[in-house]
Image (spheres, helix red, strand yellow):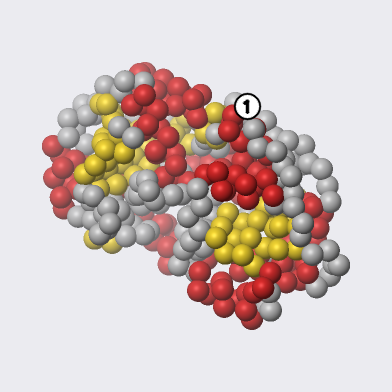
Amino acid sequence: MHVLQITPRYFPNIGGVEVVVQKISEMLVANGIQVTVYSVDLIHDLLRQQKVNEVLVKRFTPVFGDPLYLPEPKFLRSLLRENVDIIHVHNVHTLLPLFAALFKHKKTRLVVQSHYHRFGQSTLRHFLLKLYRRALSGLVFSRADVVVVNSIYEKEILCEDFKECKNVLLVPEGVDVDEVKRIKHDPVKPRRILYVGALKGYKNVDKILESFARLIGRVDTEFKLVIVGRGSEYDFLVNRARELNISSLVEWKRDLSRQQLLVEYAEASTLVLLSPLESFSRVVYEALMIGLPVVVLNYGATAYLARNGFAEGVDSLDPEEIADAIIRATNRTHPRISDGPSSFLSWEAYSNQIISIYCRL
């Protein structure tokens, strides 16, 4: 069996989709399945073709990058030459699923992993997404043999927005269960409020800064805010921290190793994630498994966690409400979430389910 994984970006780029594709690809190779990865992230310090942990990666230059990831013509010519059994394409918020559906060979099976969160990251992006939905309905989902979703929430919104999408399979996303369970939550002083993720507008990191400023103005306890990530909003956020007079209390970190990130989880008192555009948040689930209290939104993919008492939920981005939730989170003991068929899987169980889908096709 030869599987072609198509993704906007691949390792060493890091993100939710990137981790999923890397884990799938490497575990497929470990199971004796031939894997090629196409990504549209070729820049000056990456090779056009290389093997990464035995996975053959072919990178192409984007004509337009994020969010469209429109590939160069060489991508389409190469795709037409590939003799593969299955194309597994990721992220319906980009143009890649459309090209995969239009240019795949007749006998090649198509698996679409949607990573769908219903809304665009800005007003313009949402407008473009609304236009693109017609192509997704008529040209992508209609030609897909299987559509994979990674959470109950994602399945619900996908089926609501695309009524003709019938062949939807839920495969709860993978987490490094054994690795995370070995980490002991041992918060340090001063208490550390943690954010992990991209520094982009839709992540609402500016609201975390504003909430933190309100928090330290209301309590006697000493706090630090630790922000781990990189992105286009970095300069804006640093300036916002300066305007709020909290620069000395904010630590900015990026490009942490896996072990360094796990230490951040272990030493923090609370993790805060206020992004509404998530189909699944591995960061949140890893924190909960370690025993780190979490503050999330009461809607979207994280609503389930707040509703069932695993996390503190907020109904808005009001800084006062978020500050209250952080205080509650740091002073409460929440139940640890466990893996299961409707929440998340170990990566081994996850890859076994993906391989099972391939074999049925």
* Lateral position of residue 44 relative to residue 269, left or right: left
Q: Name the foreground residue: 284 vs 133.
A: 284
* Residue under the image location 44 percent in, 45 percent down: 17
Q: Position of residue 303 (x, y in %)?
A: 67, 46
* Residue under the image location 41 percent in, 57 percent down: 129
* Residue under the image location 52 percent in, 44 percent down: 258
- Image height check: is 9 above or below 20? below
Residue 7 visible from this viewpoint = yes
Q: Name the foreground residue: 251 vs 304.
A: 251
Q: For residue 250, which quarter of the picture? A: bottom right
Q: Amino acid at mark 1?
A: Gly
Q: Residue furthest right?
A: 220
What residue would you read off at disc 1? 340
Q: For residue 152, which quarter of the picture? A: top right
For disc 1, the neighbor class at 10 Å (few under 14, some 14 to 19, many from 20) is: few
- Image height check: is 218 above or below 38? below
* Lateral position of residue 65 relative to residue 158, left or right: left
Tell me the quarter of the image containing the C terminus: top left
